[in-house]
């Protein structure tokens, strides 16, 4: 999708939790995460994604630059900019 409204993000989060509730107990959950500054601020992203990833995601695929941007941390020779 090229854009998301606040309503669509809430809908996607609800759909995620519905899928998590219906998954088999031995099923691993993976997330390929790409942060988009046009969709939400780092604070909004951190508030929603941190508990979601901590509680429900077994395999996270992302970039060091995205994590640096969201959590305001350095990433060695690389930059979130």
Image (tube, rainbow, N blue to C red):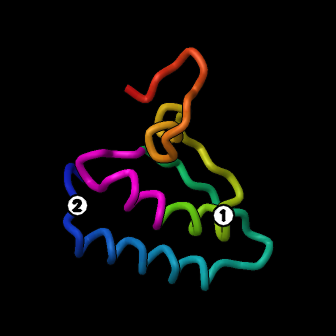
Residue 61, image x and y in percent?
59, 43
The residue shown at (68%, 52%) is 59
Residue 42, image x and y in percent?
39, 51
- Which badge, 2 or 1, is on the more N-terminal residue? 2
The residue shown at (40%, 57%) is 43
Q: Is residue 25 left or right of residue 56?
A: right
Q: Could you give the CA–CA distance between mark 2 and mark 1, rounded to whole angstroms?
A: 24 Å
Which SS class for mark 1? helix
Residue 79, image x and y in percent?
46, 23
The residue shown at (29%, 45%) is 37
**Label 1, on which residue?**
54
Residue at the top extreme of this rendering: 77
Residue 35 in the image: above or below residue 77: below
Q: How many marks?
A: 2
Q: Please check the rendered image and state whether residue 37 is part of the magenta-colored stretch, yes or no.
A: yes
Residue 47 in the image: above or below residue 66: below
Residue at the right extreme of this rendering: 26
Q: Is residue 16 left or right of residue 7?
A: right
Q: Which residues are magenta?
A: 35-47
Which SS class for mark 2? loop
**Label 2, on which residue?**
4
Check residue 43 in the rendering and tell me which mark sits there, or answer none.
Answer: none
Q: Which of label 2 and label 1 is nearer to you?
A: 1
Q: Please check the rendered image and state whether residue 61 is part of the magenta-colored stretch, yes or no.
A: no
Question: What is the quadrant of the C terminus in the image?
Answer: top left
Quadrant in the rendering for residue 45: bottom left
Residue 6, image x and y in percent?
23, 70
């Amino acid at each position: 999708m090229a854009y998301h409204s606040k309503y669509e993000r809430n809908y996607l989060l609800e759909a995620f939790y519905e899928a998590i509730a219906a998954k088999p107990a031995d099923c691993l959950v993976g997330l390929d995460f790409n942060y988009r500054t046009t969709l939400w601020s780092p604070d909004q992203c951190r508030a929603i994604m941190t508990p979601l990833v901590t509680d429900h995601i077994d395999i996270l695929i992302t970039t060091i630059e995205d994590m640096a941007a969201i959590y305001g941390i350095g990433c060695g020779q690389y930059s979130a900019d």
